[in-house]
Image: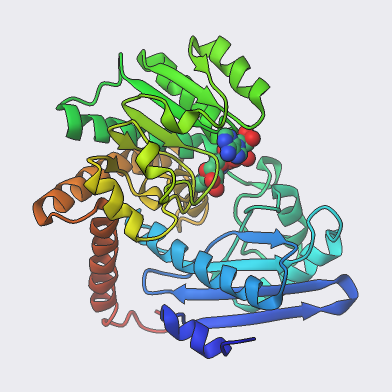
Amino acid sequence: MSMGVFDLMAEHGHEQVAFCWQPDVGLKAIIAFHDTTMGPGLGGTRMRAYGSEEEALRDALRLSRGMTYKSAAADLDFGGAKCVIIGDPAKDKSPELFRALGRFVGGFGGRFYTGTDVGTYPEDFAQAARESGYFVGLPVEYGGSGDSSVPTAHGVHEGMKAAAQHLWGQPSLAGRTVAVQGVGKVGAKLARLLAADGTKLVLADLESGRARQLAAETGGTAVSAAEILEVECDIFSPCALGGVLNDETIPRLSCRAVVGSANNQLAEDRHGRMLMERGILYAPDYIVNAGGLIQVADELHPRGPNPERVIQRTRAIGETLTAIFRLAEALGIPTSEAADRIVAERLEKTFRLKRVRLGRGG
Ligand code: NAD
């Protein structure tokens, strides 16, 4: 490894990294804690055939940091953590592997809660949950809260209304044109919400049949995955993959705002400024796509889950965004920077609040 583990942790102030190994079931997992000021670590478990241990570690560090921001921005009482399993989800999964993970996670005694991410499914965690009680997003029959893409799509929809209010003085999306890149679990649900608003839809997916079918259902238009970036529209909505806003794509955009569910949309932080300079209002991804996290976090509410609270908190995404848009405008900074500042302030306030001890265990 070119840099030591502690050097990598020091780059963004990570608290802890745990390496979990059980060779007989082929489990090699890394659990990274970034910042637990807000509460216990909460973040998904990703399974991927990483090219090297360093790549896996870097991913765990990067993703756990992202969770700190997402939770704090949504004002959830959880900190940033993430688990990665080194292995091919198509070949290396077994019930025993997830049960072994369940025991390692249980060993943290409530410092870490986890659920699905790329490469893992609710059923995998039904196995893990046999060993300890720190899993969220389980299948509904095991007490989970169900498909997280539903609140995620609602949150993006709220984000679009907040962007419309900011740009055009009213939240209505009727008659506006929205171009959706990727109509999978989130994108398709979002498109249906927008169709009900009377929005004109332009849809694209690498699986072109999916976009064509949804366009027929919603009265929209389907274009190819190559064309979607250049569609003239009011809002471009990336709901497929990360890194989509970069040096090559930003000059090609023909929209007034970017509001979508994809994680890590900015290829680099500086692309937030590039969007601002092009006059495009960017709704920071970790604010807009927090609906799914809000739902799984709610499963852990001390007084039990409550779907109504999930809806309310998801609606509040619009208010958070409005505050970010205003702050960015007032300071002349990119919205991505304004969002980071709001998170930093919230962490600072919570840190100060927690100086007062609760007594044993608090
Ligand atoms: P998904 O896999 O169901 O859908 C993604 C869709 O994008 C697929 O239909 C895929 O064919 C399409 N796609 C991939 N590359 C494309 C391209 N270049 N052009 C056009 N289409 C392309 O995933 P999802 O659950 O809908 O999530 C979408 C995005 O939102 C992901 O980035 C995910 O990380 C993020 N996200 C999802 C949730 C959630 O609750 N599901 C929560 C937060 C963030």
Q: Is residue 279 visible?
A: yes
Instruction: Judge from the rendering whether residue 213 lies leftward or rightward of residue 99; answer left or right.
Output: left
Instruction: Judge from the rendering whether residue 152 lies leftward or rightward of residue 57; answer left or right.
Output: left
User: Height in image: 275 above or below 231?
Assistant: below
Question: In the rendering, at what x and y percent does residue 244 appear?
Answer: 47, 46
User: Height in image: 261 above or below 263?
Assistant: above
Q: Residue at x 51, y 34 (%)?
A: 150
Q: How many marks?
A: 0
Screen quadrant of the C terminus: bottom left
- From this viewpoint, which residue is outermost toward the left? 330
Q: Is residue 110 visible?
A: no
- Coloration mode: rainbow
- From this viewpoint, which residue is outermost toward the right? 24
Question: In the rendering, at what x and y percent does residue 100 appear?
Answer: 78, 70
Image quadrant where residue 361 sits? bottom left
Q: Quadrant location of ligand 1?
A: top right
User: Height in image: 124 above or below 175?
Assistant: below
Say which of 173 and 308 sits in front: 173
Say which of 140 and 71 sits in front: 71
Q: Residue at x 43, y 26 (%)?
A: 179
Say which of 264 and 157 sits in front: 264
Question: In the rendering, at what x and y percent does residue 358 appear?
Answer: 33, 79
User: Height in image: 174 above or below 271?
Assistant: above
Instruction: Judge from the rendering whether residue 109 lies leftward or rightward of residue 152; answer left or right.
Output: right
Screen quadrant of the N terminus: bottom right
Instruction: Judge from the rendering whether residue 152 lies leftward or rightward of residue 116; answer left or right.
Output: left
Question: In the rendering, at what x and y percent does residue 282 appear?
Answer: 30, 44
Image quadrant where residue 165 sits? top left
